[in-house]
Amino acid sequence: MFTLLNLVQPDTIEAAYKALVEKRNNIVLGGCAFLRMGSQRIGTAVDLSRLNLNYIVEQNEYVEVGATTTFRDIETNPLLNRYFNGVLPEALSQIIGIQFRNTVMIGATVYSKYGFSDLLTALLALDTEIELYKGGRMSLKSFLENSFEKDILTRIFIKKNERKANYQHLRNSCSDYPILNVAVSKLNDQWKIVVGARPQRAIIVQKASEEVANLELNSKNIDRVATMASNEITFGTNMRGTADYRKSICKVLVKRAIMEVLQCK
Amino acid sequence: MQIEVIVNLKKIKMEVDANEFLADTLRKYGILSVRKGCDTTCCGLCTVWIDDKPTLSCTTLSFRANGRKITTIEGVHKEANEFAQILVAEGAEQCGFCSPGFIMTVLAMKNELTNPTEETIVHYLTGNLCRCTGYMGQLRAIKTYLGVL
């Protein structure tokens, strides 16, 4: 269990940021589901619930999601069920139970860059941008790859385009953490193959993603690309599976995801 | 700090610590139907409704309930009783420790889903663990209760 020495509920994002950076052990509170599993000693906890960041709105080019929107809100949102073959609700639907998904927040998961995240894998396969209060707006890819100063993630933007997408995962049992997850998407001839829970954080498998665009997609070629994808990235070992095991199932999940995307309308 | 919440339609002022969770606060104020069964945020026993949404009270910091509406099984006595009768008739109540959280999820499901399939029901209830036995009796009871046999 964590310890909070002090709690603030700022009314403005400026005040929230100021409180956050005041001391090294100050943090922003999300849904607290993962925080609760540790024993961190927190100086000042910054609660964002007065900043009205709980929303999903459709803009001209993007679906904008506020940082304190819960997983369940995303899962049941009609817009996000309509776009990208419902890949985001699909990726979230296996995470523990609905009570849990009513609690955890998108901003906290993305900011924390959790390796086990189902959400990050699916978001990375789409054209997603994030906004940090100080750091500004950037692609999710660049946010995941680079390190930034302590900041507050305010909003997430998902580009509304005709991207076809599919999400695959392997778990020991329903609602457990994923052993590996894969999201594949396609916009015209541009493919993205994303692998997450390796158990390191999700990444785009670059070469295989480029290769798949150049091939006639028959069963043999899809096999080849899937093998290529599993050779291109590194895997790790933890209590849920070995690196070798993950590498083997990566091939299968990538193949399945590509085949599903080809069927997407 | 002091928070004011509406628990089962009654306004209550509660004194809470900054890092106190709602499940503990509710128990401290005598609402003993709220239980904790896992310490790992996965069993669903502590389920209460916050503004009518089923939520893990073991993971919700109490201060976040300030000004909001909390419903526990004590607040939905009639519906809970009706479902409990069906549950008992199916022989699925077992030790009963998980029942309050489980029933709050079933009642929330009735409010949220229209004509659910067996798959949808199972998906909605995945976050509720019962350590006594399997879930077939519970599933039969839910289908009877929802009228989707």
Image: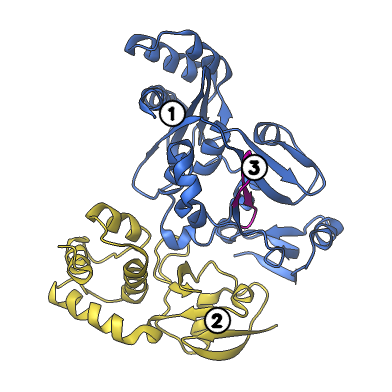
Q: Is residue B96 left or right of residue A62?
A: left
Rendering quarter of residue A90 = top left
Q: Residue at x 19, y 69 (%)?
A: B141
Q: How many marks?
A: 3
| Residue that numbered label 3 is attached to | A157
Q: Nearer the viewer, residue B90 or A261?
A: A261
Binning the other alpha carbons within 10 Å of mark 1 as few (below 14), some (14 to 19) or many (20 upward) gives: many
Query: Circle 1 sits in a helix, a strand or a loop, which is it?
Result: helix
Amino acid of disc 2: Thr
Question: In x, y percent, where is residue A187?
Answer: 52, 24
Q: Quadrant of the N terminus of chain A?
A: bottom right
Residue range corresponding to the magenta coloring: A57-68
Q: Nearer the viewer, mark 2 or mark 3?
A: 3
Q: CA distance from mark 2 to mark 3?
A: 37 Å
Q: Residue at x 43, y 15 (%)?
A: A227
Q: Nearer the viewer, residue B82 or A241?
A: B82
- The image shows residue B111, relative to residue A14, as above or below, that is below
Q: The chain drawn yellow is chain what?
A: B
Question: In x, y percent, where is residue A166?
Answer: 43, 32
Q: Chain of mark 3?
A: A
Question: In x, y percent, where is residue A200?
Answer: 57, 34
Question: In x, y percent, where is residue A202?
Answer: 56, 33
- The image shows residue B128, relative to residue A109, as above or below, that is below
**Residue B25, labelled with which disc?**
2
